Image (cartoon, grey):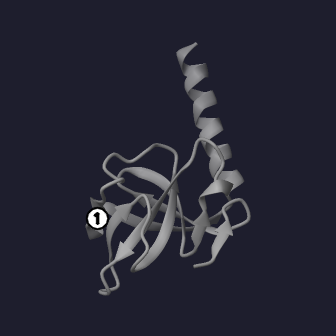
Amino acid sequence: MCKVNAKTEAYESFFILGQDALFTNSRLDRTTIPEGLYAYDLRDECDGNINELKDFVLVNHWGTVLVKEPIEGADKGVQIKADDYNYLGDSMTIDEFMSEQNETEQMSEVTLA
């Protein structure tokens, strides 16, 4: 089981359970994930479709997503249906994804001021 550095991995923009996310087919070395991001593995039950999101998946690993907010229940597993996720079609780096988060936070602060 080869794990890759999250900071150097190539990602696809993704949407899952109401959150923007980054997706990779790789297993990420959790120690390389920047603070403020949460990693979850996706499971496939051999039918070609994602059916579970979990903190860690050993068997039938489909891929890994990074999100900005924790997903409740991921420690035990969250069942995923086809309409719970979508590929958005763009490539994105982890720095671009985190920069997007900082821009949104700055806009919120300006709006509140």
Q: Is residue 81 above or below residue 95?
A: below
Label 1: few (<14), some (14–19) or many (≥20) C-alpha neighbours in 10 Å: some
72 sits left or right of 10 in the view:
left
Q: Which residue sits at x=64%, y=37%? A: 103
Viewer-side residue, 100 vs 35? 35
Q: Which residue sits at x=36%, y=62%? A: 53
Viewer-side residue, 27 vs 10? 27
71 sits left or right of 30 in the view:
left
80 sits left or right of 13 in the view:
left
Measured as percent of width and height from the top left, residue 78 is found at 29, 58
Q: Residue furthest right?
A: 8
Residue under pointer 1: 80
Q: Which residue sits at x=38%, y=61%? A: 54
Q: Which residue sits at x=43%, y=74%? A: 58
Measured as percent of width and height from the top left, residue 39 is found at 51, 56
21 sits left or right of 32 in the view:
left
